[in-house]
Amino acid sequence: MQSWLTVCGRGEAEHTVSRSRFIAVAAPAETEAACQAFFEEIRRKHHAARHNVPAYALAGGAAWSSDDGEPSGTAGAPVLSYLEKENIRDVALVVTRYFGGVKLGPGGLVRAYTQAAKLAVEAAGLCAVAMRLVLTFEMDYASYHRAEALVAAFEGGAALRGTVFGASVRAELVVDPGSRDGALKALSAALGGGKEVAVLAERTEAARLPGGQGG
């Protein structure tokens, strides 16, 4: 997965369907342990509720949900399906239901839980996330200053960070994975004389992109 959406922060929303209260809370979470801790927090807060329906979807591919006593496939599954369909990852979500005495039927439950999840995500706001390639390199001062200008103008999108000034300059170049070769070519041009950039280390990381949807 090269890019996805995640919630910008914690969001909570409530709606009522046939006297049943649905209270949904969404929160950022990047590990299964963080998701489970969040679920326990919400269960303690709403211990008197009949149902606390949890779901999570992680960027690494792990996903899970539970109907927590609702008819099979009517609660946790539609919440998780909504998250996956909208490409929302690294999120934990709980929909709490305080039963109002009126049965909603399978279709009504699916709609009510899905709507609650959507409202919580809207309250949290969405941020775009993408994988970035981080290349650590080293060059002399004159080359580094030329590299700054080239990187700023690089069409594929790139940034320099983590600069350490010593006998030479060590820095990290952050680029889209598909722009690796072009970015290194631009840095080689900065060195002059056809020299190649010495890549000391290379890794990928997830990074939030500027802007977002909602907030």
Image (cartoon, rainbow, N blue to C red):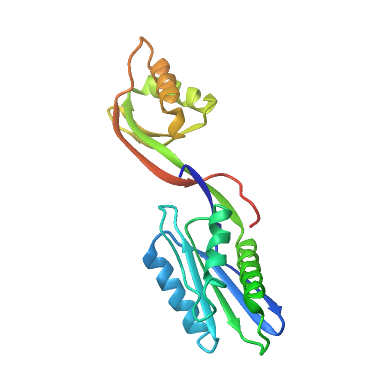
Residue shown at 47%/83% (left/top)?
44
Position of 63 compared to 168: left or right? right
Work out which residue is located at the far right of the displayed protein and give it.
Answer: 18
Q: Position of residue 12 (x, y in %)?
A: 61, 71
From this view, report whether residue 54 is shown above or below residue 169. Answer: below
Residue shown at 54%/79% (left/top)?
70
Position of 134 compared to 125: left or right? left
Position of 82 compared to 19: left or right? left
Quadrant of residue 104 in the image?
bottom right
The N terminus: image quadrant: top left
The answer to whether residue 143 shows anywhere in this view is: yes
Q: Nearer the viewer, residue 110 or 212?
A: 110
From this view, report whether residue 31 is shown above or below residue 205. Answer: below
Q: Position of residue 45 (x, y in %)?
A: 51, 83
From this view, report whether residue 48 is shown above or below residue 41. Answer: below
Q: Nearer the viewer, residue 51 or 4?
A: 51
Residue shown at 45%/30% (left/top)?
178
Position of 114 compared to 196: left or right? right
From this view, report whether residue 45 is shown above or below residue 156. Answer: below
Q: Position of residue 119 (x, y in %)?
A: 65, 66
Q: Position of residue 5 (x, y in %)?
A: 55, 51
The C terminus: image quadrant: bottom right
Q: Nearer the viewer, residue 198 or 212?
A: 212
Q: Nearer the viewer, residue 68 or 13?
A: 68
The answer to whether residue 10 shows anywhere in this view is: no
